[in-house]
Amino acid sequence: MYQIVLLRHGESEYNRQNLFTGWSDPDLTEKGVEEARAAGRTLKEAGYTFDLAFASVLKRSIKTLNYVLEELDLLWIPVQKSWKLNERHYGALQGLSKIETAAKYGDEQLQIWRRSLSVRPPLLTADDSRYARNDRRYAEVRPGDIPLGESLEDTVHRVGEFWNQRIVPLVMKKERVLISAHGNTLRALIKYMEDIDETALLHLNIPTGIPLVYELDDEVKPIRRFYLGEPEKVEEKAREVANQGKVTE
Ligand SMILES: O=C(O)[C@@H](CO)OP(=O)(O)O
């Protein structure tokens, strides 16, 4: 049996303000830093260690990973960063308020944009300053691969490819791998590995900063997944994610 640990970054500034994030690059909040450190301590207490780690090229994922590795005294292990682990690209919604978007287009449309499998958000235009082609960190990416907006299905495609090409071979060599990524990247990976149906996917919300352990069989297919944390806390944090876009009293 193999094992791998996935982690969604700690709370970011955009999470705090309830803004669509995608490939925007906000920093962690103080709470997010604490969540990341707590994830590191949880892993340490449970006896986990790692041979190498992955992050996206977005600072909330990279910094979360660094805080976790610091707690584990593993800052020295190799880290591979890839845009393929970036959050799902939220197109022209990036930077907009989820609450204002719900008020303008309705809760149902918001839910479709956030949680459906195949619907893309409104796309960016190529002259938009948010278009990643103008960002040096994507200089090596083929221009045609840089999205103007992605459906979750698009994200499943790029993350699934990355999983097969870059992660599975390491897992099969018994490398202990930690992946620090994003809410929808992890939803995409779960969809890819388990092929869960659309209703389940609709309700799948990944809490920030709670390690998610996958046990995998000899063919690197999932046996089971579980969070390292108290179930009530995990539930509560997943509910917070689900409720973004709702006005609270
Ligand atoms: O804005 C985003 O990029 C994601 C993750 O923060 O949000 P959502 O949960 O709405 O898909």
Image (cartoon, helix red, strand yellow):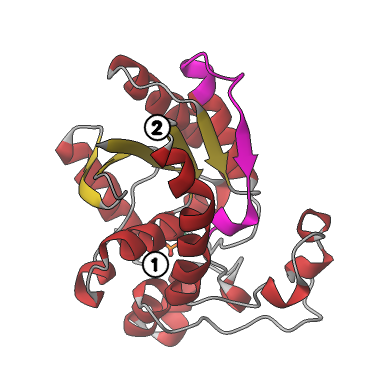
Q: Position of residue 121 (x, y in %)?
A: 52, 81
Q: Position of residue 64 (x, y in %)?
A: 53, 35
Query: Do tag 2 and tag 1 residues touch (Cβ < 8 Å)?
Result: no
- Which contiguous range is marked in magenta? 69-87
Question: Residue 9 or 17: which is nearer the viewer?
Answer: 9
Q: Position of residue 213 (x, y in %)?
A: 29, 38
Disc 2 element: loop
Tell me the mark number nearer the camera, choosing from 2 and 1: 2
Mark 2 residue's CB less than 8 Å from ligand 1: no
Residue 14 forms part of the magenta stretch: no
Question: Residue 236 or 106: which is nearer the viewer?
Answer: 236
Residue type at numbered disc 2: Lys
242 up-or-down from 171: above or below: below
**Left or right of 77: which side holds 128?**
right
Name the residue tied to disc 1. 245
Binning the other alpha carbons within 10 Å of mark 1 as few (below 14), some (14 to 19) or many (20 upward) gives many
Which residue is rendered at x = 46% and y = 17% of the image?
Answer: 72
Name the residue tied to disc 2. 174
